[in-house]
Amino acid sequence: MAPTVKDCRASLAMTTHRGISGMLGFDQGMITVYARWIIRWRWAVLVACLLAVTAAAYGLRNFQFSADYKVYFGPDNPELIAFQAFEGTYTKSENILFVLQPADKNVFSRRTLEIIRQLTEDAWQIPYSIRVDSITNFQHTAAEGDDLTVADLVDQPLELADSRLAEIKTIALNEPALAGRLIAYDGGTTGVSVTLQFPGEDHTRHLPEAVAYAENMVAKLRASYPDLTVALTGIAVFSAAEIQVSESDSFTLVPVMYGVMIALLLLFLRSVSGTVATLVVVSLSVVTAVGLMAWLGIRMNASTALAPIIILTLGIADSVHILLTMFQEMRAGRSKRDALVESLRLDAEPVFLTSLTTAIGFLSLNFSDSPPFHELGNITATGVAAAWVFSMTALPAMMAIFPVRIKAQTEQRRLAMDRFGDFVIKRRKPLLWSMLAV
């Protein structure tokens, strides 16, 4: 006769009480005493948790976001060291590149060259620009007898003769400094490169201003010349995009995640108080992790910006485990207080073990060569640890205060998941081989 869900649950409880207790050294009696202590001093526990989170959140006054791509390289990275030496010898700069492609795929027309000339002139107005390069202002050297003349390759494009246009095309496509750089080898696409130099070491505050100005220029070009394909790229654009994406995620993904979390928690827990308590726990965990990050002087970047979302996802598990067991005990006829104590007694060790292994998994990111992944692992591990702490303190304290309406059920009334569990257990072998085949 195949075991039932009830039999498996009893077996799991025995494993929890003996196996994990023996391995981790937890004492069930001590956990019971602890649970009763939390319930008795619930208000004091909540105040202590809020004070701890407030202390961590105070570090957010130092919160900074870095869009510097160099953060992805360690201080001992040989390529970064060589690049910094190069910048020390010459200058530190970022760039914006306007990419233009006319509809006829011919850059060397009077109209297109005039557009490039005008864009080159306007690009000097971009904040922090120190140099603008294009095929029109390229300094071409020509020999006239014994004299050498240096002048812009293109001057007054609208007045150029056909022969001069052909000459400009030949020069540009055979000039190593232009061909394959600012002009495509087929002459169908060109670029206008703007070199930027920002004050100070942190460019995060200045990047959006320069890129926003360039994006406005692109919008005007597209409106004035609908047949002209215009794109924007470059290191400065990439760095500014990191800031924009991170800000966008904060204002879109996080609210969406909270909405999905609330819907699923209400669906599975069927308890408003349990849903609110879980949301409070994960929110406190995120604030604690990010606040401690700011205290340590770690600047947020595109990679570490994922940490709050990951913590929100993982932090739910601890609370849900404890709440489901509590509600199950209440359905079995226990009072709210006794059910909460029993839930902590049964779930304290499994929840701890789950949180521990999850934190260790994220801490393994410290073996990565890229510092932002070290920080992502450390922040997430801190958030997971905070979620466990608040699940064992703030959660039971809140549930001891909040009203919980769970009706006791008769033994004959079985949940859908119990029936599903019995189905899986009875057909375990066919299901196992089917899953392996898949």
Image (cartoon, rainbow, N blue to C red):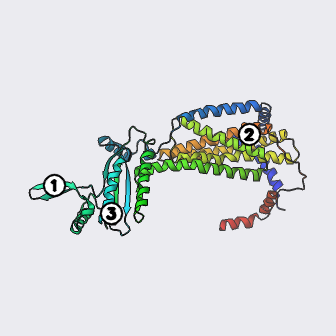
In the image, 32 versus 407, the foreground residue is 407
Tell me which amino acid carries mark 3: Thr
Q: Is residue 14 visible?
A: no
- As helix, strand or loop, the secondary structure at mark 2 comes to helix
Q: Quadrant of the N terminus?
A: bottom right
Mark earlier in primary sequence (3, 2): 3
Q: Position of residue 60 (x, y in %)?
A: 56, 35
Q: Residue at x 59, y 48 (%)?
A: 251
Tell me which amino acid carries mark 2: Leu
Check disc 1 and report the residue beneath it.
149
Q: CA distance from mark 2 to mark 1?
A: 80 Å
Check disc 3 and report the residue beneath it.
112
Picture quadrant of residue 109 = bottom left
Q: Residue at x 78, y 32 (%)?
A: 37
Q: Position of residue 240 (x, y in %)?
A: 46, 48
Q: Is residue 63 visible?
A: yes
Q: Is residue 35 found left or right of 437 in the rendered image?
A: right
Check disc 2 and report the residue beneath it.
395
Tell me which amino acid carries mark 1: Thr
Q: Is residue 346 above or below residue 225?
A: above
- As helix, strand or loop, the secondary structure at mark 3 comes to helix
Q: CA distance from mark 1 to mark 3?
A: 25 Å
Q: Are marks 3 and 2 in contact (CB under 8 Å)?
A: no
Mark 1 burial class by Cα count in 10 Å: few <14, some 14-19, many 20+: few
Q: Residue at x 44, y 47 (%)?
A: 69
Q: Are marks 1 and 3 in contact (CB under 8 Å)?
A: no
Q: Position of residue 309 (x, y in %)?
A: 61, 48
Indicate which label's residue lies in the foreground, 1 or 3: 3
Mark earlier in primary sequence (1, 3): 3
Mark earlier in primary sequence (2, 1): 1
